[in-house]
Image (tube, grey):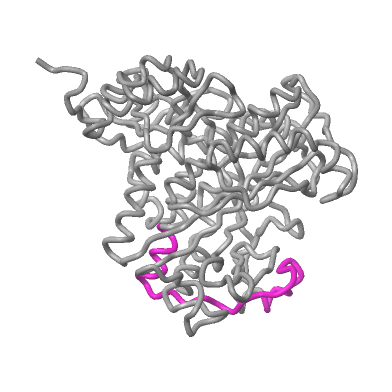
């Protein structure tokens, strides 16, 4: 007879016993429910929740959720591929107990990321967390590489309660100004306390450029954990804001004009404990593999935007001369370059040196974005790609001849253009696999169709509260 403690296809040996113990511990701490979280193809966080007493059952058998969400749009319309989008079938959500945390910003709740498994115990080909784990494992097997990653999170804070329409900034004062820090001092102090209670290492938290905008930078982890942390950080920001009577938007463009919310990726490659982005003989201390990795990211960047900038609203943010990185260019500490080489301060470079990929926003599924960027960089290593000449200053000011000589070209200016680039990129589509690649195309085309006829203000309004 099968018992609850027997190993099951989607779980791991020992998870049920561990979940049973955790359930008792959580109940003793006043936790009544567990949020089971993942991110869909459109970049929207989706959840199921279970009572704390059912955590062991979730660890053993998973929790049901339809695969149709792989082809949901941000507005909850459904598109289809030849595999996905049907009302048929079921998946099981299996919580990763290693990353379960008690939510300090939502008393009474804990949170855990999930892996999505079929009822037959197979890894679901649309599960982006599984995809990222596979690509990281392949990099170690084929190239001896490990990675550290972090996702910057920018958000706009508004006066609440939220009406599903206009946004009124909760901040005045100049960009990065002391006035802004004081105005939301209680909120941000509680936010820092919540992060600390949840084990989230914060490097910086500060007011940013746009109206009502803040940014938090967190410590680097392995890519899967970094993507998990990005989802948790946003859950926490939203939960703490709610308790302060505030609302938040992570949309790429809260307004049609001005600077939007980014979700820049920071990524470093390591081999045998050594950071490949420093101590080498290449430019700024990069090793040959680090240069080739950066070259691979640059080469695939036009197609990557279909993944890293996946919303029609993303292209309201991706404008020249706004530090969004909208040209295929790289430079050391150049904030207009799409790929910024961060060397770090002397004395810390062996730990701090990394690449920042800038044309990324928080409509992007972080698992999918990291997996795609790593796949692009690995293709650069495999092909010994050559990193072109760096740029300084704003690439928008380069004349046509100089831009062509340095391989600098404008990234797609619309989601439709990005999808066309993605369709032509066999490397990225191959890395994602046919089921997920087709879902990316279908969802992006669906988003484009959903805003047909809207002006920029209408597009910003349509996505303001979706992420």
User: In screen coordinates, is 367 left or right of 330?
Assistant: left
What is the number of callouts on the image? 0
Question: Image point 51% across, 72% down: which residue?
Answer: 350
Q: Nearer the viewer, residue 241 or 209?
A: 241
User: In screen coordinates, is 373 left or right of 258?
Assistant: left
Residue 29, visible in the rendered structure: yes
Q: Residue furthest bottom?
A: 281
Q: Is residue 259 above or below residue 22?
A: below
Question: Image point 89% across, 44% down: which residue?
Answer: 179
Residue 310, by quadrant, is top right
Question: Image point 58% across, 61% down: which residue?
Answer: 356
Q: Position of residue 421 (x, y in %)?
A: 50, 53
Q: Is 393 a magenta residue? A: yes
Q: Position of residue 460 (x, y in %)?
A: 72, 34
Residue 412, by quadrant, is bottom right
Magenta highlight range: 375-402
Q: Is residue 274 above or below residue 33?
A: below
- Quarter of the image containing the N terminus? top left
Q: Nearer the viewer, residue 439 or 42?
A: 42
Q: Position of residue 6 (x, y in %)?
A: 17, 24
Q: Is 254 a magenta residue? A: no
Q: Position of residue 372 (x, y in %)?
A: 44, 52
Question: Image point 34% across, 42% down: which residue?
Answer: 130
């Amino acid at each position: 007879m099968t018992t609850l403690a027997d190993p099951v296809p989607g779980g791991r040996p020992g998870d049920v016993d561990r979940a049973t113990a955790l359930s008792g511990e959580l109940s003793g701490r006043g936790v009544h429910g567990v949020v089971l979280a993942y991110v869909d193809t459109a970049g929207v966080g989706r959840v199921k929740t279970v009572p704390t007493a059912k955590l062991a059952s979730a660890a053993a058998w998973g929790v049901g959720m339809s695969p149709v969400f792989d082809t949901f749009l941000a507005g909850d319309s459904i598109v289809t591929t030849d595999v996905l989008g049907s009302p048929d079938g079921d998946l099981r959500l299996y919580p990763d107990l290693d990353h379960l945390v008690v939510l300090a910003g939502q008393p009474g709740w804990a949170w855990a990321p999930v892996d999505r498994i079929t009822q037959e115990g197979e890894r679901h080909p649309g599960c982006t967390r599984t995809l990222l784990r596979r690509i990281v494992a392949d990099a170690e097997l084929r190239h001896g590489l490990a990675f550290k990653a972090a996702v910057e999170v920018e958000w706009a804070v508004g006066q609440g309660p939220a009406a599903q329409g206009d946004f009124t900034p909760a901040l005045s004062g100049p960009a990065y100004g002391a006035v802004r820090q004081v105005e939301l001092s209680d909120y941000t102090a509680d936010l820092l306390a919540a992060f600390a209670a949840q084990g989230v290492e914060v490097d910086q938290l500060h007011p940013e450029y746009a109206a009502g905008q803040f940014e938090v930078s967190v410590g680097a982890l392995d890519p899967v954990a970094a993507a998990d942390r990005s989802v948790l950080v946003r859950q926490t920001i939203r939960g703490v804001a709610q308790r302060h009577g505030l609302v938040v938007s992570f949309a790429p463009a809260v307004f049609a004009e001005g600077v939007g919310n980014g979700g820049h990726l920071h990524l470093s490659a390591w081999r045998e404990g050594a950071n490949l982005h420093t101590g080498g003989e290449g430019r700024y201390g990069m090793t040959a593999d680090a240069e080739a990795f950066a070259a691979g990211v640059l080469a695939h960047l036009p197609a990557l935007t279909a993944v890293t900038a996946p919303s029609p609203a993303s292209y309201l943010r991706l404008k020249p001369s706004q530090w969004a990185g909208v040209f295929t260019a790289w430079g050391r500490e150049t904030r207009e370059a799409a790929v910024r080489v961060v060397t770090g301060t002397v004395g810390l470079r062996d730990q701090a040196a990394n690449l920042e990929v800038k044309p990324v926003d928080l409509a992007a599924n972080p698992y999918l974005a990291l997996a795609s960027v790593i796949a692009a960089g690995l293709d650069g290593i495999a092909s010994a790609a050559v990193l072109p000449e760096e740029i300084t200053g704003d690439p928008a000011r380069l004349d046509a001849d100089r831009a062509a000589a340095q391989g600098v070209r404008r990234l797609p200016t619309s989601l439709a253009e990005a999808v066309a680039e993605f369709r032509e990129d066999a490397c990225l589509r191959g890395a994602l696999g046919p089921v997920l690649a087709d879902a990316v195309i279908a969802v992006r085309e669906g988003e484009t169709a959903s805003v047909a006829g809207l002006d920029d203000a209408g597009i910003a309004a349509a996505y303001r509260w979706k992420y």
